[in-house]
Amino acid sequence: MIGRGGSLPWSIPEDTTFFQNKTHRHTVIMGVRSFGEWPSCVRGRDVIVVTHAPSSLPSPVQAAASLTEALAKAQTLHGDVYLCGGQRLYEEGLPLADVLHLTLVHTTVEDGDTFFPDWRAHFTCETARRESHDARWRYTFLTLVR
């Protein structure tokens, strides 16, 4: 489960820092709702938003009508390419990815409405694992490859 009511059901500063550091100076692809949750992502990243309303995006964000178009645009931009949600982009992009950086939050959210696809069949080799926690959450940072 990765969402509830249009946003993350948790706030984990260590995870946010990890994500920001990992994607800095790289290209991120996200859906329009994910972009709405994190509009400051434009600082230090090339951003491509998959949307059918490109005129609603601020400069220098690029628009793409599909993940396929976004990936083609990303090949002309800086660094690695990261898919940053939401659910539909993860479902379409997971079979195409080589590496998965995943934070598993060890909790149950009863009213979650957005889900990360099952990744276990695609990523069978764990290359890094780090357990952590804060005052409210326990979580695991994983890096997996095919």
Image (tube, rainbow, N blue to C red):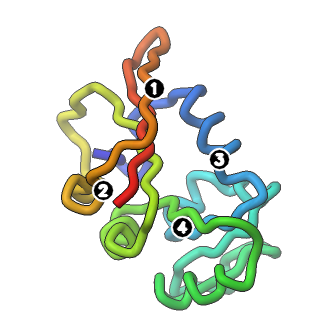
- Mark 1: few/some/many CA within 10 Å (<14, 14-19, 20+): few
Image position, residue 113 (x, y; %): 25, 51
The residue to which callout 2 is attached is 123
Position of residue 54 measured from the top left corner of the image (x, y, whole percent) = 63, 85
Whole-Å distance between the Cαs marked 1 and 2?
17 Å
Mark 4 surroundings within 10 Å by alpha-carbon count, few (fewer than 14), some (14 through 19), many (20 or more)? many
- Tell me the element at label 3: helix
Q: Is residue 59 left or right of residue 125?
A: right
Residue located 65% across and 80% down the image: 74
The disc labelled 2 sits on which kind of residue?
Phe
Left or right position of 86 against 75: left
Image quadrant where one finds the N terminus = top left
Residue type (three-letter) at the residue carrying disc 4: Met
Circle 3 sits on which residue? 22
Task: Please give the label number shown on residue 130.
Answer: 1
Classify 10 Å Cα crowding around label 2: few (below 14), some (14-19), many (20 and above). some
Q: CA distance from mark 4 to mark 3?
A: 15 Å
Q: Quadrant of the C terminus?
A: bottom left
Rendered position, 114 above or below 127: below
Q: Residue 18: percent from the left, percent from the top? A: 61, 37
The crowd level at tag 3 (other Cα within 10 Å; few <14, some 14-19, many 20+) is: few
What amino acid is labelled 3 in the image? Lys
Q: Label 4 belongs to which residue? A: 30
- For the question of whether residue 115 can be seen, the reply is no
